[in-house]
Image: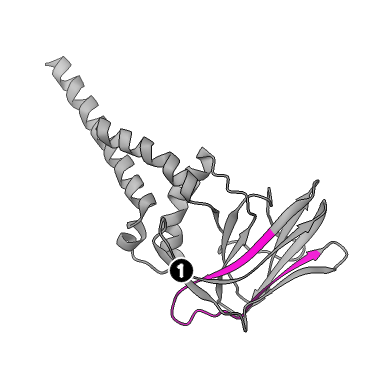
């Protein structure tokens, strides 16, 4: 029991340091130009997992300071996955500040070790933006899955680790179409199993200790 808990505690800072993007699952969220998904702390690296349906999806940035803005487009490496996806960064006056175009871009394959999933890396852009309000518009083929990566700063506090612990297996199942066993075959799944085992052993040990005292 103690060995499992010690191993879990030792792995946590390693994962926090290596898993750069804070994951966000937005496939079930409806967004529009008047009701966008808010990107808090745009300088911090986040990965938004979404799916295009009948209309573009919108994100909003509201910052009171200049931001060294980074945008990157990725998609899951799956059969029939479209790369006809565009991302536009627009200021409050409707001026286009950045444009990512999936069509014609040379997408490159890569494997993300910590989630144990395959991606295609698309276009990216880095541009400073002054304090203000901005819109990010994602558009493309219907049912196209996409990952919108924002921000450069790698920050992964404890609450984000717990969030990733739950979200990564869910992303693997719902976004990549993995079965539950495949979805758990990664560092986050192993840590969930290890934590569950540690809790189970703790409960069992406590129950046995209580019974011994009664005897």
Kindly state the secondary structure of the residue where label 1 is placed: strand
Above or below for 88 versus 187: below
Q: Quadrant of residue 143?
A: bottom right
- Furthest residue to the right? 93
Depth check: give the residue in front, 147 or 43. Answer: 43
The percent position of residue 63, horizontal first and vertical second, equals 78, 49
The N terminus: image quadrant: top left
For label 1, the crowd category at 10 Å Cα-Cα, with few meaning under 14, some 14 to 19 and many 20 or more, is few
Would you say residue 136 sits in the magenta stretch? no
Answer with left or right where residue 62 lies relative to residue 40.
right
Residue that appears at 42% across and 62% down: 172
Above or below for 54 versus 111: below
Residue that appears at 47% across and 69% down: 119
Give the labeled residue for mark 1.
110
Residue that appears at 52% across and 40% down: 159
Query: How would you classify the magenta stretch by its main secondary structure?
Result: strand
Answer with left or right where residue 86 lies relative to residue 76.
right
- Furthest residue to the left? 215
Would you say residue 89 sits in the magenta stretch? yes
The percent position of residue 124, horizontal first and vertical second, equals 64, 68
Q: What's the magenta region?
A: 70-90
Residue that appears at 17% across and 25% down: 208
């Amino acid at each position: 029991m103690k060995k499992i808990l010690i191993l879990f505690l030792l792995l946590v800072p390693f994962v926090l340091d290596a898993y750069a993007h804070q994951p966000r699952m937005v496939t079930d969220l409806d967004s529009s130009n008047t009701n966008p998904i808010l990107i808090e702390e745009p300088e911090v690296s986040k990965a938004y997992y979404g799916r295009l349906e009948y209309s573009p999806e919108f994100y909003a940035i509201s910052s009171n300071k200049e931001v060294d803005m980074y945008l990157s487009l990725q998609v899951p490496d799956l059969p029939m996955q479209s790369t006809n996806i565009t991302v536009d960064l627009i200021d409050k006056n409707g001026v286009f500040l950045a444009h990512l175009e999936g069509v014609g871009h040379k997408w490159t394959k890569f494997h993300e070790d910590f989630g144990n999933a395959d991606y295609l890396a698309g276009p990216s852009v880095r541009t400073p933006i002054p304090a203000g309000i901005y819109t990010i518009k994602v558009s493309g083929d219907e049912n196209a899955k996409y990952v919108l990566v924002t921000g450069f700063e790698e920050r992964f506090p404890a609450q984000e680790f717990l969030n990733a612990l739950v979200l990564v297996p869910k992303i693997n199942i719902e976004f990549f179409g993995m079965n539950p066993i495949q979805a758990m075959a990664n560092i986050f799944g192993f840590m969930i199993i290890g934590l569950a085992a540690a809790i189970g052993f703790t409960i069992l040990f406590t129950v046995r200790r209580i019974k011994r005292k009664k005897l």
